[in-house]
Amino acid sequence: MSPPSIKKILISDSVAPECKEVLEKAGIVVEMKTDMTKDELCEKIKGADGLIVRSATKVTADVIEASDCLKIVGRAGTGVDNVDIPSATKKNIVVMNTPGGNTLSAAEHTCFLIGSLARQIPQAHMSMREGRWDRKKFMGNELYGKTLGIIGLGRIGKEVALRMQAFGMTTIGYDPIIDGKTASEFNVEWMELEQLWPKCDYITVHVPLIPQTQNMLCDETFAKCKDGMRVVNVARGGIYEEAAILRALESGKCGGAALDVWEKEPTTNTALVQHPNVIAVPHLGANTREGQRRCAIEIAEQIVDWVNGKGLVGA
Ligand code: NAD
Ligand code: MLT
């Protein structure tokens, strides 16, 4: 693919300022406008050779159709599920991401949520705010000796495993493309999902949302799990079926759920958000200064490298 001519780039989400700086240094004109409606974006996209987004902007077929010289959609982050890739491909538009830029942020966030589930830290904090001193209610569990099931042993899954092993957790996992030998190199015992479900005290997913992973945790799979097991999702809403989580919380099958991502964002699922055993956060996995800075610089440098004929990067 020959290097493109990229003169103007539109940034439509709150991408860290370093992105604009790197692009401008390379002589590219950058316009930053966030919180646009679909119609505003369809208007603004005209004349832009590139569009850089995080997850808020939905780069739909209509947006791609409205563009007149778009050559690249850059995602400052990992998942490209907010970009209509088939429509982009039809118009020869490259879709590029920064797959490793926020790995550590998302992995650390997952670990904090596992710890928060074990000790109900957010709930205890809220109760103190309400004037209570409730030591009995917040009896926790040690993580030591517990089993963490990690579904998806890619970049984030591996980093979560390494960190949680420091607490003495046994880490088991499943991934269709990571074999047992590779998993054992980072001390994860690989097993099929059918073997994994009944063994876990905690389950965390680090997979893309695709037909094979949608509603992976549902009534049927909850039934195979230990009573009182806890779940974390810092990957994508929809991998766990929200209605099934609520049913499992109410029956006691699930002892707690920490949810960073939601079937619909912003979520309107107040039953889950308000549930006493739910820790709810608004898609904060990648929200660190370090992670955002890395993604912002990486996406800008990858575009500049492509313009300068150094090839294409992304996953
Ligand atoms: P990755 O590509 O490195 O790893 C994903 C792994 O999932 C791969 O190894 C793949 O083989 C595996 N996988 C695919 N289908 C599977 C299946 N059916 N069962 C089990 N494993 C399967 O991706 P990553 O960088 O580790 O990111 C994981 C997820 O986290 C993505 O969905 C990404 O969008 C999301 N993410 C969320 C945040 C956040 O802010 N909450 C931040 C970064 C990434
Ligand atoms: C990602 O896939 O990188 C994320 O969900 C993080 C984000 O951009 O907020």
Image (cartoon, helix red, strand yellow):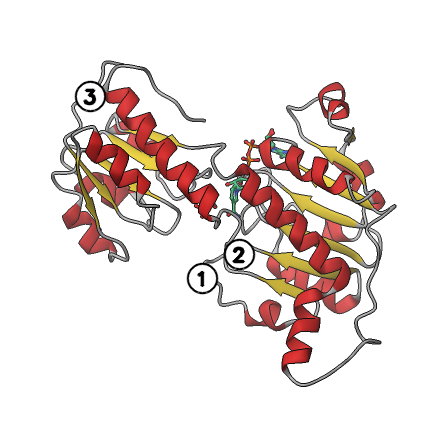
Q: For the residues carrying marks 3 and 2, which lies nearer the camera in this image?
A: 3
Q: Check whether the beta carbons of the residues at disc 1 and disc 3 lie within 8 A of each other.
A: no
- Residue at 61%, 42% (x, y): give it: 107
In the rendered image, is residue 80 in sight?
Answer: no
Q: Check whether the beta carbons of the residues at disc 2 and disc 1 lie within 8 A of each other.
A: yes
- Residue at 23%, 29% (x, y): give it: 91
Element at label 1: loop
Ligand 1: give its quadrant. top right
Residue under numbered circle 2: 262
Q: Residues within 10 Å of mark 3 (few under 14, many from 20)?
A: some
Element at label 2: loop
Residue 102 marker: none
> Of 118 and 151, which appears nearest the observer?
118
Q: Is residue 23 left or right of residue 165?
A: left
Residue under numbered circle 1: 266
Residue under numbered circle 3: 4
* Placement of 191 over or under 147, stated as above or below: above
> Of 31 and 176, which appears nearest the observer?
31
> Of 251 and 75, which appears nearest the observer?
75
Q: Type of residue at label 3?
A: Pro
Q: Quadrant of residue 301?
A: top left
> Of 85 and 105, which appears nearest the observer?
105
Q: Residues within 10 Å of mark 2 (few under 14, many from 20)?
A: many
Q: Is residue 146 left or right of residue 178?
A: right
Q: Quadrant of residue 241?
A: bottom right
- Between the residue at mark 2 and the residue at mark 1, the CA separation in whole angstroms equals 8 Å
Which percent across, then down, holds residue 47?
11, 38
Q: Residue furthest right?
A: 145
